[in-house]
Image (cartoon, rainbow, N blue to C red):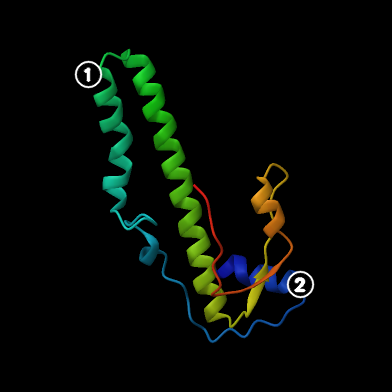
Amino acid sequence: ADGYVGDALAAQGAASDDPGLVVDPSAFAGQAASGLSLEDLLSIPAARAQQAIMTGLSPATAMQAGEGALRMYATTEVADAARTAAQVSMVTHRVGGYIREVGPFCCARCGILSGRWYRYSAGFARHP
């Protein structure tokens, strides 16, 4: 996060007001954004796959569904941890805010929110 924020500031020609603080990556490990332990969250797809098999779904289909859910949870949690660490780094670098950008395949709501300036501490409604 510190490297990303420092590089982003440098690329924009912005001075970094870096007090020498460093983001500790371990502070973002082990807990899901929902508040569950990461271990508990990542065990949900396996439990659901097992339950689906017990209700008559084929093992292959149940395992595919479980794998898809596990990939989604893992991807989302890594992105959430990175985003949160970047926000903390913005605070340590005394960055006041950011302009939200989106990718080419974003939903309509995210498209509307793109291009606006947000204070580093301002949240916006997110969706699953």
* Three-letter amino acid code at the position of disc 1: Met
Residue 13 location, quadrant: bottom right
Q: Is residue 25 left or right of residue 14?
A: left
Q: Which mark identifies residue 16?
A: none
Residue extending furthest right? 13
* Residue 78 image position (x, y, % from top left): 46, 51
* Residue 57 image position (x, y, % from top left): 31, 15
**How many other residues sit within 10 Å of disc 1, few (<14), some (14-19) or many (≥20)?**
few
Q: Which residue is mark 1?
A: 54
Q: Which mark identifies residue 12?
A: 2
Residue 32 location, quadrant: bottom left
* Residue 1 image position (x, y, % from top left): 54, 66
- The residue depicted at 42 percent of the width and 44 percent of the height is 74
Residue 53 location, quadrant: top left
Of helix, strand and loop, which one carries label 1? helix
Can you say whether 61 is above or below 94 in the image? above
**How many other residues sit within 10 Å of disc 2, few (<14), some (14-19) or many (≥20)?**
few
* Residue 119 image position (x, y, % from top left): 61, 76
Mark nearer the viewer, 2 or 1 = 1
* Three-letter amino acid code at the position of disc 2: Gln
| Residue 27 or residue 53, whichever sits in front | 53
User: Disc 2 to disc 1, how far (Cα)?
Assistant: 56 Å
- The residue depicted at 53 percent of the width and 79 percent of the height is 91
| Residue 127 or residue 40, whichever sits in front | 127
- The residue depicted at 47 percent of the width and 47 percent of the height is 76
Can you say whether 6 is above or below 83 in the image? below
Q: Is residue 98 left or right of residue 25?
A: right
Of helix, strand and loop, which one carries label 2? loop
Q: Quick one: label 2 or label 1, which is nearer the N terminus?
A: 2
